[in-house]
Amino acid sequence: MRKLLLFVCAALLLAQNPKVATLTVSASGSTLFIASGTDAQGTTNFPTRIYHISASWNTSADVYFLYGTGSVCATGATTLLGTYKALTSLALDFPTAPLIVPPGKDFCINFSTTVTAGGGATYDQRP
């Protein structure tokens, strides 16, 4: 727990404009976690840098992360990090080398079966 707290603190320090995304889902398949970054004119030109992801859910499920466009990242879907098998929770930290989602792409989480889940992510979006 102490290491996790240190990683989260490091992630917040590295992020120039830290934001927190929350996850609340009761479904299977893909769910939007972090929407793409936009400027004041609505142009999607900012990559998303993710420093920490944590979530837990009520039943064992395979989980993977992806990015794409559309409400469930279905258009141009690209899988990140591979599949985590038969989990009920996870905590991932990227304090010095954040997970990067390209500009104009949303970040989603996919569950292999219906779950009730909650969690969060620390990220920033900047040029």
Image: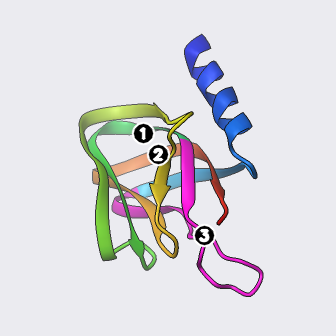
- Are dots 3 and 1 in contact, CB under 8 Å? no
Residue 2 higher or lower than 113, as above or below: above
Residue 43 higher or lower than 92, as above or below: below
- Locate residue 64, reporting x and y percent: 31, 50
Q: Is residue 121 left or right of residue 12?
A: left
Whether 30 is among the magenta residues is yes
Q: Judging from the image, what secondary structure is the residue with disc 3 in?
A: loop
Q: Earlier in the sequence, mark 3 or mark 1?
A: 3
Q: Judging from the image, what secondary structure is the residue with disc 1 in?
A: strand
Q: Is residue 17 visible?
A: yes
Specify the label residue 57 is tagged with.
1
Specify the label residue 117 is tagged with.
2
- From the image, tell me which residue sits under label 3: 46
In the image shown, does 56 or 64 lie closer to the viewer?
Answer: 64
Residue at 57% x, 15% y: name it: 3
Query: Closer to the camera: disc 2 or disc 3?
Result: 3
Q: Mark 1: few, some, or many residues within 10 Å (few <14, many ≥20)? A: many
Residue at 55% x, 34% y: name it: 96
- Are dots 1 and 2 in contact, CB under 8 Å? yes
Q: CA distance from mark 1 to mark 2?
A: 4 Å
Which segment did they paint magenta? 27-51
Q: Judging from the image, what secondary structure is the residue with disc 2 in?
A: strand
Coloring scheme of the render? rainbow
In the image shown, does 98 or 117 lie closer to the viewer?
Answer: 98
Q: Is residue 49 left or right of residue 19?
A: left
Q: Earlier in the sequence, mark 2 or mark 3?
A: 3
Residue 7 higher or lower than 23, as above or below: above
- Which residue type carries mark 1? Trp
